[in-house]
Amino acid sequence: MLQPNYISLYRSGELKRRAEALEARLKSCDICPQECGVNRLEGELGFCHSAYLPIVAAVCAHHGEEPPISGTKGSGTMFFGNCNMRCVYCQNHQISQNWEKQKSNEVDCHTLAERLLYLQAVGCHNINFVSPSHFVPQIVRAVLEAVPMGLRLPLVYNTSGYDSLKSLRELDGIIDIYLPDLRYASNKWGKKFSQAPDYVEQARAAIKEMHRQVGDLVVDDEGVARRGLIVRHLILPNRIAGSRESLKWLVNEVSPNVTLSVMAQYFPSHRAPQVSLLSRKILPFEYDEVVELLDKLGIENGWVQEMDSAENYLPDFERQGHPFDLGVGKPK
């Protein structure tokens, strides 16, 4: 098994340098594209309602990700609380947009490091950071502490795609597998439905940087991801996701061999039932349009979720497997 690059970064002292550089930016926070400028080190709260301590809603062996991520033993998943977006249709809104309740899930970085080692010990294929964009410094600090404790698993950065280019560059050589969403092709919808007014520019720049760092997907002999990029694209009603434009951009500007996960699981969650354009599931013709587009663009790598399987879909937080208590590491 190849050794993750973050181990050599640790040995050279570069991992420590990056952790400290990222933490210094929390004093006037610009960790994500919201760039609130608050002093999170002193407890000030910006858009993400998160101070210095990371907020971890759940830790589990997750079997519901894409096949190369979950494998046979599960992905060692950490669901971070709060978010740097406000999607009106968020299927995990209980943990992403209920910051008052999530305050009770704050942990220190050493505890976070211990959980990384626990997930490794129970046999997970990787460590999967879900919604990590606002906690990049804390993640790097936890990895820094976990390496001398024995951490050796590949790291997955599982994100909405609304990421800071400056922060991503600090993750070069630390993250092995990037798993971003590509939500919109129009800033109009990014602003209206996710409070991310520059989503298109930020997500596209982020995905190009991710690909520069890790390239196309590479799997081992058992089909488990070792390195590379997987892009997720959720089909939304009324063509709001801009699938045609986004997927053309992926093929033309990122890689003709891009690995794509097309999701048909949309349902009107959270506040979406009150939003006319988002108040229903996708229709068969909307699904078929995207499937046909994959063939026209020659996209051959990845997965397309069947509409039938989407009927019984549960949000990530509800189908996460067996969560473990952060304090003792035993099943709840």
Image: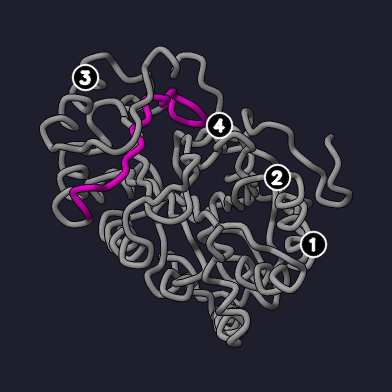
Above or below 85: residue 235 = above
Q: Earlier in the sequence, mark 4 or mark 3?
A: 4
Q: CA distance from mark 3 to mark 2?
A: 38 Å
Q: CA distance from mark 2 to mark 1?
A: 19 Å
Contact (Cβ within 8 Å) of mark 3 with mark 2: no
The residue lying furthest to the right in this view is 328
Q: Which residues, given as a range, are shown in magenta?
A: 255-274
In the image, 54 versus 294, the foreground residue is 294
Nearer mark to the viewer, of 3 and 2: 2
Residue at (33%, 27%) from the top-left corner? Answer: 304
Q: SS of the residue at dot 4? A: loop
Pick the quarter of the image with the N terminus.
bottom right
Q: Earlier in the sequence, mark 3 or mark 2?
A: 2
Mark 3 belongs to which amino acid? Asp
Q: Residue 172 location, x and y as percent?
A: 44, 72
Q: Which residue is mark 1?
A: 111
Tell me, for residue 288, which label it has, or none: 3
Nearer mark to the viewer, of 1 and 4: 4
Q: Residue 324 location, x and y as percent?
A: 79, 42
Q: Earlier in the sequence, mark 1 or mark 3?
A: 1
Does the segment drawn in magenta span residue 32?
no
